Image (cartoon, helix red, strand yellow):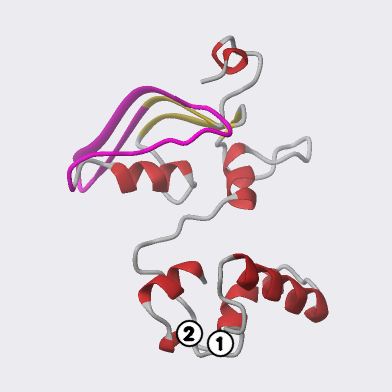
Amino acid sequence: MSDAVAAGAIPPLFEVRGLRAGFAGRLVLAIDSLRIAEGGVTVLVGENGSGKTTLLRLLNGLLDPDEGSIRFRGLPFAGGARADGTVDGRAAVRAHSVMVHQLPLLVRGTVAQNVGYGLRIRGVARDAIADRVAGALEQVGLPGFAHRRATALSGGEMQRV
C-alpha cells in the first residue's frame, strides 16, 4: 500500500468495514476491515467455500451485504444516483469493472453481438460499436472472431469475450 493511501490522503480502491454475508441463514463471509489499494495486485486465496467469490460479488455490487459497508474510491455503495446527480460507489464500480465468471453466460449469436451488447443497450451508434468491438477483440487476442458463433467458442475464448 502506498504511503499516501495509508495516510488517508488518497482513498483506497475498495474499503470494507464490518462486512457480513450469508446464504440461507448461514454466515459465509465476515470481514471486519479490508483496504485494497488502487493500482496494486490483490490475490484472494482460500479453500472452496471460504467466501472468495462472495467477496468479489459484493465488491462488484452483484450482492448486497447482510451487514457492513463497502466504499469504492471513497464513494459508499448506496443504491444508485444521489440527489446531487453524482453516482454512488456501486454505480461507479459497475461503470469501471466487470466480473468474469469461470463459466460465462453468453447470449445466442455472434461474438460481436455479445461484446457489443452493453454498448447497444446504452444507445451507442452502430458504427462506433463495430469499431469498439473490433478494438476490444484485438486487445484480448481474438481478432477475426467477430462473426463466429458464441456457442462454438472454447472455454477460454468465452471468458475473453
Q: Position of residue 48 (x, y in %)?
A: 18, 48
For marks 2 and 1 on the same chain, the one whose residue lies earlier in the sequence: 1
Q: Where is residue 66 in the image (x, y as percent from the top left)?
A: 35, 36
Left or right: 52 with respect to 79? left
Q: Does the magenta stretch include residue 17?
A: no
Q: What's the residue type where badge 1 is placed?
A: Thr
Q: Mark 1: give few (<14), some (14-19) or many (20+) Cα within 10 Å.
A: some
The residue nearer to you, when weighing 108 against 91, is 108
Q: Position of residue 23 (x, y in %)?
A: 24, 47
User: Residue under circle 1?
Assistant: 110
Identify the residue shown where x is 57% and y is 83%.
Answer: 145
Q: Is residue 29 magenta?
A: yes
Identify the residue shown where x is 46% and y is 77%.
Answer: 106
The quarter of the picture where residue 135 lies is bottom right
The quarter of the picture where residue 117 lies is bottom right
Asked whether the residues under the numbered discs 2 and 1 touch, taking CB atoms below 8 Å apart as contact, a structural biologist would say yes
The quarter of the picture where residue 34 lies is top left
Q: Is mark 2 on a helix, strand or loop?
A: helix
Residues in magenta?
19-48
User: Residue under circle 2?
Assistant: 150
The residue positioned farthest toward the top in the image shown:
7
Q: What's the residue type where badge 2 is placed?
A: Ala
